[in-house]
Image (cartoon, helix red, strand yellow):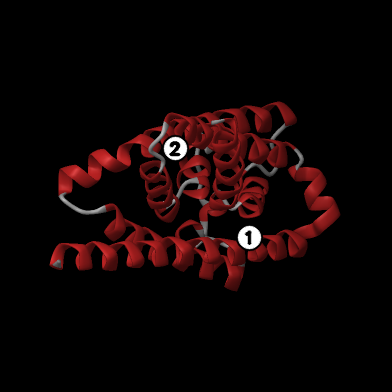
């Protein structure tokens, strides 16, 4: 039981961390909070992480309910969510940015913690679908607990990176952060391919079983 929990926790932490595209979030955070004090930045980080967690928690358990409500299978949703995630990965690899979140630093907002930082910079359309898929795949209690703690750990690591964003900018520079975003996109593309291929394999197996 503990081995199952630890394995799920470790894999979920890595998955959720890359789904959040941490170095892209750091880049956006630096642009959105330019000129703010350390206290203001800490407040933005805290509220954005809490907002992302609440949304992630809802999505984690919403998958099965949504699939039943609209009459689609998990495998079909895997294919759709994986394809959308792959497009996001391509955008990260090509330009180091998520296509749905470009141009946000120029927007004038009173509070950037929830919109646009938590949504859609941290959790965008592709991330929403992937979280729902991962949540629906976990069936046992140890797996669910491991998955939830993985989500929490991924967000906590992201929070640490955001607190260190000024230091990361000095050490890596904008070019270095952009390169790290592209590397994250490459890993994200592999995750997207796995989701799509799992969905296709499951869909084919279900079709063959139904035809027997």
Q: Please identify the quarter of the rendering in which residue 56 is found.
A: top left
Q: Please identify the quarter of the rendering in which residue 45 is found.
A: top right
Q: Specify whether 58 is left or right of 149.
A: left
Report whether residue 110 is seen.
no
- Where is residue 168? Give x, y as percent: 79, 49
Q: Secondary structure at mark 2?
A: helix
Q: Residue at x 59, y 70 (%)?
A: 93
Q: Residue at x 35, y 62 (%)?
A: 199
* Towards the viewer: 91 or 71: 71
Alpha carbon distance from label 1 to label 2: 20 Å
Q: Specify whether 22 is left or right of 134.
A: right
* Towards the viewer: 94 or 79: 79
- Where is residue 101? Give x, y as percent: 49, 56
Q: In this rendering, is residue 95 above or below 159? A: below
Q: Residue at x 21, y 68 (%)?
A: 208
Identify residue for label 2: 56
Give whichever of discs 1 and 2 has the lower sequence position: 2
* Towards the viewer: 127 or 48: 127
- Where is residue 51? Give x, y as percent: 48, 32
How many marks on residues? 2
Q: Secondary structure at mark 1?
A: helix
The quadrant in which the C terminus is found is bottom left
Q: Which mark is residue 211?
A: none
> Given contact means CB atoms under 8 Å apart, are the residues at marks 1 and 2 in contact?
no
- Where is residue 156? Give x, y as percent: 64, 34
Q: Please identify the quarter of the rendering in which residue 2 is found.
A: top right
* Towards the viewer: 38 or 119: 119
Identify residue for label 1: 184
């Amino acid at each position: 039981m503990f081995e199952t929990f630890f394995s799920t926790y470790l894999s979920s932490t890595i998955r959720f961390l890359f789904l959040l595209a941490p170095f892209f979030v750091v880049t956006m955070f630096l642009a959105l909070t330019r000129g703010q004090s350390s206290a203001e930045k800490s407040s933005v980080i805290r509220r954005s992480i809490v907002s992302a967690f609440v949304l992630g928690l809802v999505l984690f358990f919403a998958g099965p309910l949504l699939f039943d409500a609209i009459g689609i299978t998990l495998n079909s949703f895997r294919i759709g969510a994986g394809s959308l995630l792959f497009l996001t990965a391509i955008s990260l690899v090509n330009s180091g940015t998520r296509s749905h979140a470009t141009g946000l630093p120029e927007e004038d907002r009173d509070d950037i913690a929830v919109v646009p930082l938590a949504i859609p910079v941290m959790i965008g359309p592709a991330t929403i679908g992937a979280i729902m898929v991962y949540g629906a795949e976990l069936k046992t209690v140890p797996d669910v607990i491991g998955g939830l703690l993985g989500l929490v750990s991924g967000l906590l690591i992201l929070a640490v990176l955001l607190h260190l964003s000024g230091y990361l900018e000095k050490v890596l520079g904008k070019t270095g952060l952009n390169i790290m975003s592209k590397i994250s996109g490459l890993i994200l593309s592999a995750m997207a391919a796995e989701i799509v291929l799992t969905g296709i394999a499951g869909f084919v197996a279900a079709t063959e079983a139904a035809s027997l």
